[in-house]
Amino acid sequence: MRFRLALFALLALLICGACVSQARALPLKPWQDETLAFNISLPEGWQISHVPGEDEAQFLIAPETYDGSEESFRIYLYFSKTAEDELQNHLELSSERIEQWMSALIDESYEIYNKNELKIDKKPAMALDFAKPDGESYLVGRVVIASHPDHTLAFVAMANREEWNATVRTFDKIVSSFKIKKTMD
């Protein structure tokens, strides 16, 4: 009897795991733009553009079909050079910039449900997954903040749960492809 119960429980877990599995990542191609201070790869049919405003450090990365809705998958990127020589000043300035930027994107009703460490351009980074209820489903996202000695760098990806599950692996590959261009100062 115990064996059958354990077998049934294992089978149920496997079936549930298959139901929530995420799609494979889309293939990426290097994005060609000599004006950017970084290199990044994107899926075919995706684009990167500056977000209008005073701060030239904000970008939107999305499929050409992005309709601007809260449910559609999109990635926001914050990237700027920090002109601070002292580490403490750099950290304070970066933290202030990122907090202001994220508060405009992510409202207080989202809750963090997962934390992970990774690397962006060989530098330590932290990822926080967040979500909030949206009718019968959820709006889901991930913040990735990198620790870089002379740049402020963060990604925020967001979508409804269905689009998130279909695109999160692509987001992970895009983040992994990010490299700051080396300059000769």
Image (spheres, rainbow, N blue to C red):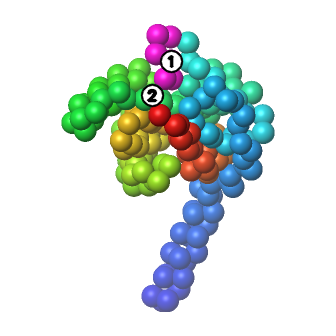
State the SS at label 1.
loop
Magenta stretch: includes residue 182: no
Task: Determine whether, in the image, residue 55 is placed left or right of residue 8.
Answer: left
Residue 83 seen by the camera: yes
Which residue is painted at 67% across and 43% down in the image? 41
- Residue sitting nearer the eye, 162 or 61: 61
Please report contact status of discs 2 and 1: CB closer than 8 Å, yes or no.
yes
Which residues lie in the magenta part? 53-58
* Amino acid type at mark 1: Glu
Q: Quadrant of residue 84?
A: top left
* First-in-chain label (2 vs 1): 1
Q: Which residue is drawn at 64% across and 47% down?
A: 170
Three-letter residue code for mark 2? Ser
Q: Is residue 69 visible?
A: no
> Residue 166: which numbered mark, if any?
none
What residue is at 54 percent from the left and 41 percent from the top? 182
Reading the image, the residue beneath label 1 is 56
Task: Residue 20: give x, y in percent of width and height.
Answer: 59, 55
- Mark 2: give few (<14), some (14-19) or many (20+) Cα within 10 Å: some
Determine whether the residue tagged by mark 2 lies in a helix, strand or loop.
strand
Membership of 56 in magenta stretch: yes
Using residue 144 as the reference point, say whether residue 52 is left or right of it. right
Q: Which mark is residue 80?
A: 2
Question: Where 164 falls versus 110 (above or below)?
Answer: below
Nearer-the-camera pick, 95 or 81: 81
Q: Residue 80 location in percent, x, y?
A: 45, 28
Label 2 to label 1: alpha-carbon separation: 8 Å
Residue lying at 70% horizontally and 37% vertically, measured from the top left: 31
Secondary structure mostly taken by the magenta-highlighted segment of the chain: loop
Task: Name the residue at the top extreme.
Answer: 54
* Residue 132: image location, x then y, percent: 43, 35
